[in-house]
Amino acid sequence: MTGPGNAPQRQARPIRPGPRSAAALALVSAPGVVAFGWPLLASSSSGLAHSADAPWLFALLLPLLLAVAAATVADTGLDAKAVAMLGVLAAAGAALRPLGAGTAGLQPMFFLMVLSGRVLGPGFGFVLGSVSMFASALLTGGGGPWMPFQMLSMGWVTMGAGLLPGPHSVRGRGELALLAAYGAVSSLFYGLVMNLQGWPYIAGMSSGISFVPGDPLPDNLARYAAYVLATSLGWDVPRALLTVVLILTCGGTVLRALRRATRRAAFDVPARFGD
């Protein structure tokens, strides 16, 4: 795209991961991975009670999620325009989530999160995904010990869209196809990860799909695969299909609108005050 005098205009990104924000992302992701996966490595005598220690995980993860936003501000000098865009997109994502709640797992929120992460970058994407999940929980009364896990998972989904090949190398229909494929994979990934969070204490201990503390990892993974097939795949696949359809049909328009808003906001231009 060119501007006056045919000077090329680059797409500004309001949040670029700097050293501190990258360290904060690693800091919040590492305990998040442990929180999701530690039951698979727990011994039979560990007193596994995932539901009982979930509030402690909430107390750990929520400040770390906020630390990502603080580190991003410190790295990039996040200004009022970027904060305003973050608020608008988070509100839109929170409003989209309840539209499909309870209907075969359909969640149009994923469509907006993938496109926003693509245009605005991985740092902005992680903060946006996490804040959108938090706002939607407040909007729907869905707060609980699972909320930090949802915030972390959606942050990963939106951040991943910002890490895809740059828009200068993939544009047009190729870009929409790339985003649709990523939307499908990330929608399934979200369900897979969130099932892992709830499986140890929701599935019970009396069936062939139940978690068994101390069992060999391959055996528990086989039971987990059966659990996913039996309980949640019917929700995850419709979510992925809806995300693909929305990206292919509306993605081009939304991408242009987001890029136009980002370009006009001129996040990278420092404020200057005249006499």
Image (tube, rainbow, N blue to C red):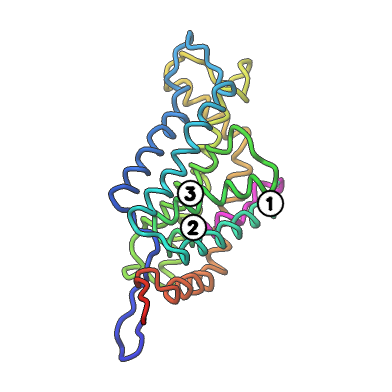
Image check: 63 left or right of 7? Answer: right
Secondary element at tag 1: helix
Amino acid type of the residue tagged 2 in the rendering: Val
The picture quadrant where one finds residue 7 is bottom left
Residue sticking out furthest to the bottom = 5
Q: Is residue 193 magenta?
A: no
Tell me the magenta residue range: 102-115
Residue sticking out furthest to the front = 275
Residue 31: percent from left, percent from top: 41, 32
Q: Is residue 63 visible?
A: yes
The picture quadrant where one finds residue 202 is top right
Say which residue appears at 31% left-offset and 88% top-offset. 6
Image check: 76 left or right of 239? Answer: left
Q: In the rendering, which numbered label is found on residue 186?
A: 3
Q: Is residue 109 above or below residue 104?
A: below
**Quarter the C terminus occupies:** bottom left
Q: Earlier in the sequence, mark 1 or mark 2?
A: 1
Secondary element at tag 2: helix
